[in-house]
Image (cartoon, rainbow, N blue to C red):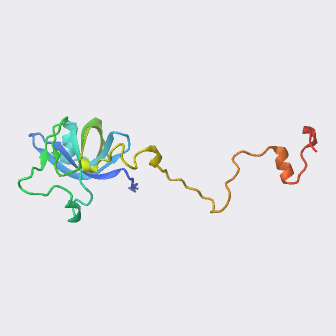
Amino acid sequence: MKVALEKSSSVAPALLSTENDDGTFVLVELRIRWELGPVVSVWLPARGQTARNLAVRPDVVFNLPPDGAGTEEGTAGSTPCTTDAPWTEPSELVRPPRLAHCPVQLEARRLGERTVTDGAWTQIEAQVLRVHADPRWVVPLNGPGTGPAAWHPPVHDFRPSGTPPPQTVPAPAREMAQQWERRFPAGSGGA
């Protein structure tokens, strides 16, 4: 079987927390994808505990760790890991807890049934119900660089520099004939 993976800017590492049958919670690290607005899509091993939990109980929390959370440099701005600091905090709309050291946490609920592919993988989509974000990661609405005037979409121009842009509206036939030193048809009142 040949597989092609497409790298997308909407793919992000996440720590998922789901609820087990006995009321405890399980945590798994994987990558999630945003493609459908407030819906998160995730592929899980079909026989894994997280997939089994989501098949029975639809609540899930996507905890987005800070960049470089596994390295020494990435933990400088995050909460220090001490035995006194709590690892989790309660969610507001779902049962699984949120991870306290993650700057962005998405409380979500599974949509529909899971899709099993080749018996090895399952795809689950979840509707985001509530977003928790560290205020240091939030850009203010009226801050610099957030207005429509600050947005500069990428424009690709494949013309060599220094060449004039092509005419967008074609000239009338009479003007084109004179420009190319051709005779305009006589039936139309030509010269």
Q: Residue furthest left?
A: 84
Identify the residue at image location x=90%, y=43%: 185
Residue 102, x across and y down, in percent: 21, 51
From the viewer's perspective, is 39 left or right of 94? right
Whether residue 120 is visible to the viewer of this picture, yes or no, is: no
From the viewer's perspective, is 23 left or right of 101? left
Whether residue 10 is visible to the viewer of this picture, yes or no, is: yes
Identify the residue at image location x=9%, y=52%: 85
Quadrant of the image containing the C terminus = top right
**In the image, residue 149 above or below residue 111:** below
Q: Nearer the viewer, residue 10 or 89?
A: 89
Identify the residue at image location x=90%, y=38%: 188
Q: Nearer the viewer, residue 170 or 19?
A: 170
Residue 22, x across and y down, in percent: 8, 40
Q: Residue furthest bottom?
A: 72
Quadrant of the image containing the N terminus = bottom left
Q: Identify the image quadrant of residue 90.
A: top left
Residue 13, x across and y down, in percent: 28, 53
Total marks shown come to 0
Q: Nearer the viewer, residue 174 or 147?
A: 147
**In the image, residue 142 above or below residue 6:** above
